Image: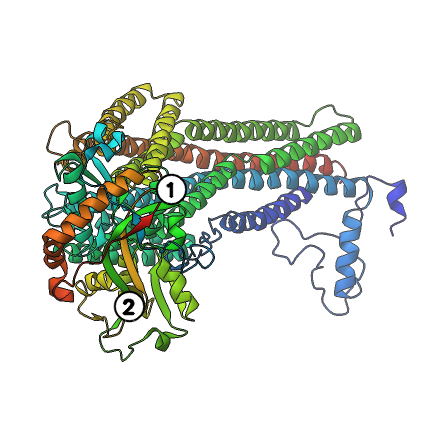
Amino acid sequence: MSSRWAIRRSSGLVSVLAAAAVVLSACGSGDYAATPLPTPQPTPSTTATTSGPAAPTTCTPSAVTSYAPLPTLDTAAVPPSIVARQSLRVGVSADSLLLGARNPLTNAIEGFDIDMAKAVAKAALGDENKIQLVVIQSADRIPDLQNRTVDMVARNMSMTCDRWNTIAFSAEYFQSGLKILVPRNSKVVSLDELKGKRVCAPNGTTTIDFIRSKGVEAVGAKTHTACLVLFQQGKVDAIAGDDTVLAGLVAQDPYAFVPKMSALTSEPYGLAFNKDDKDFVRFTNTLLDQMKADGRWKAIYDKWFAGPLGAAPPPPTSVYGRT
Amino acid sequence: MSQQSSTAPARRPGPPTPAPGRPGGPAGMPPPAPPGQLTTTAPVLPARGGGLRAVVRSAFEGTPGRMRVIAAVVALAAAVFGVVGANSLWTSSAALERADHNTTQVVRVQSIYSDLVRADAAATNAFLVGGLDTTGQGPAYDEAVAHVAATVAAAAEAQPADGAALGALNQQIQTYTSLVEQARAYNRQGLPVGATYLTNASTGLRSGALPIVTLLTQANTDRANAEFRQSSNGLALGISGVVALLVLLGGLLWLARRSHRYLNVPVLVAVGLVLVALVAGAFTLGQVGSTVTTVRGTVFDTTLDLATIQSSAYDAKANESLTLISRGSGQAFEKAWQGQSTLVKTTIGYIDTAGDATLSTDLNAKWAAYSAKHQEIRSQDDGTKTVASNWDEAVRLAGLPTSTAGSANATFDAFSQATADGLATYSQQTSDQVLAPRTAVTIVGWALLLLCLAAAGLAARGFGQRLEEYR
């Protein structure tokens, strides 16, 4: 009797425990914590970096003053490393339409700067194809010259007092000016009207320093074309850049527009070299003077800019006197 | 309190219990007596609650009372062990199944990673060649993206905990694909802004989408490992088993002393049954533990290694194209290629360590073949101090279609095919080996429960025999 009771009692407990076990095993049935998400980081493309403290705008000799040209195009002035390699390494842009841009259909990099660089290669090595185009970004121009990754930079580079401290320039080969690009329906005709608006310019350029000083919200990007992407995505309201560069951007986007305005700054372009390659700079100046005189300069200008900017103006005057 | 209990131990104290077979209420409820008639066998009980208490109290008084208590404890210990032990085994079986789900999800998520970098490698490679796509990389991009979409959907269905992360991933993938589409459209118009869209797409993929996939891989690997640990967790089984055994032995000893008989056969058999159940349960979980250790050390590890190899290899291939697209300033991408290549080779080494020398040798040879082609491309693009670089030749080499034997794309294709085959084989083996012990473990769980219930019954019966002697 009591043994039955004991059994009945224990089997009752068993059923209770069995029920508990079902609950128990259900507890460990893979209810996992949600997979975490990465903590968001600031988008690097929209962080502006400055090229340093405000650079002096006047100096002696002036920023456009270069070394005197050689009497003749003497190839003895070409650095031996270039001759040995039989190739001129030139830092260029691959996405500045009209100046230096990759043609997606042919894969060739072409533009005004490229034709100038080819002219230097032809004069130095006898063949305009003895050239290696190295695609660099604005911020790489000076370091690449200093550590000789490239022999020359032909990448819409403005001659400034500050840059003369670290590198050397040829005589001015193009006169450009800073303007702004806005949406086609915009009424803006000056930078002042963009106060507090987001304006894009490439990092490490004179442009980004300039626009920041004018009270706009400067947004940095790797290149002007990266600025165009931000503009198309509505992440910036305008782009600041040299009229030549902006012409190349307008050519890629029918909704972009450069209003009629006088240039905010004058941007004299020079071909840039390592500071120690003075003789090569003088050699190049000889070539530039010849090209300006014999119509080759005008032919190259018209080839790229006659359409968007009108017929070629007189070539910029070379200024010499630096020693 | 009954005064006789101390002098007459043989007399059964307490109220009567219902007669056998008689339909009665619960113990302690006396049969209803006709009004005015006194029962001769039992005193009139006061209130119902008080009566129950008195009955219970008296049921546990004296030696028979203690015997009942010990009988209950002994039977309960065996039964508890039965339930806890069986539950441990069933939990183990369920954990194995979940571990399999989680490892499958790891492989699935890793395939999202490698499909994304494969898509990027195809997009950048097609872009590099310029003009009309002659390498067949355009369709390869579309195929990879379609595969990603299907896998993300499958992954979201398989693991609800991944839902939010996969949602965020989907958003990133949409951004990526729309940027690539814009890049393609501009590229067809011959506009350089297309290249910038493509670079932005690649950069965004690596900074936005891939980190989410990495977290998904980590979370699912952690879940799989937790389930693997759970599957061989024998703590509850061991403790409850040893306790049951000690209680039974204690009961056996107590009974031997009280009844002056050395052995109570039913209780002794119960001890044997519990011992058998304990040994069988522990042995089974031990087997599961060693299976899991083997799986984790061999096939599962190799599966993860192959997934790493696959995604690193595609990443390297995308970087090869990005280096050329950067045209002279792609050192960062080439550095990334070197890093991925080192990771590929190191990880192939792990496969050798895990025991598959054939596969590791094959993969090493195929990666070396592709690496040699990559070096050819690099030396053409870089040039030397005295030899001019030939970017066009580098691009031609990099853009040769997979159908051109010995080209970079062909050697890479051979490598990725071998990796994909290995991955399919090993993930299947992992699944098979993880799931293999499940049936046996479940059956042992039921056997353990039945053995312990039988032991509980026998123990109760053994004590019941002694209790009979007190009547």
In three-dimensional space, the C-alpha distance between marks 1 and 2, rounded to whole angstroms, equals 53 Å
Q: Residues within 10 Å of mark 2 (few under 14, many from 20)?
A: many
- Residue A57 left/right relative to B182: right
- Closest to the observer, B321 or B35: B321
- Amino acid on which disc 1 is placed: Val
> Callout 2, which amino acid?
Lys
User: In the rendering, at what x and y percent does residue B101 appear?
Assistant: 38, 43
Chain name for mark 1: B
* Viewer-nearest of discs 1 and 2: 2
Q: Residues within 10 Å of mark 1 (few under 14, many from 20)?
A: many
Q: Total label count?
A: 2
- Residue A164, how many percent across, how many down? 37, 49
Q: Quadrant of the C terminus of chain B?
A: top right
Output the chain of dot 2.
Answer: A
Question: Which residue shows up at 56% across the image and 37% down it?
Answer: B85
Task: Tell me: A170 left or right of B128.
Answer: right
In this view of the protein, can residue B426 be seen by the observer?
yes
| Residue with the most extreme bottom position | A187
- Kindly tell me whether residue B14 is visible in this rendering: no
Between A272 and B304, the residue placed more toward the observer is A272
Q: With B466 as the anchor, is B182 left or right in this view?
A: left
- Residue B423 falls in which quadrant of the image? top left
Q: Position of residue B115 (x, y in %)?
A: 27, 44
Place residue A278 in its image quadrant: top left
Q: Residue at x 39, y 25 (%)?
A: B350
Name the disc covering residue B106, or none. Answer: 1
At mark 2, the secondary structure is: strand
Q: Are marks 1 and 2 on the same chain?
A: no
Task: Report helix, strand or loop for mark 1.
Answer: helix
Rendered image quadrant of residue B239:
top right
Judge by depth and name the residue closer to the eye, A10 or A36.
A36
- Judging by the rendered image, the residue that carries numbered circle 2 is A179
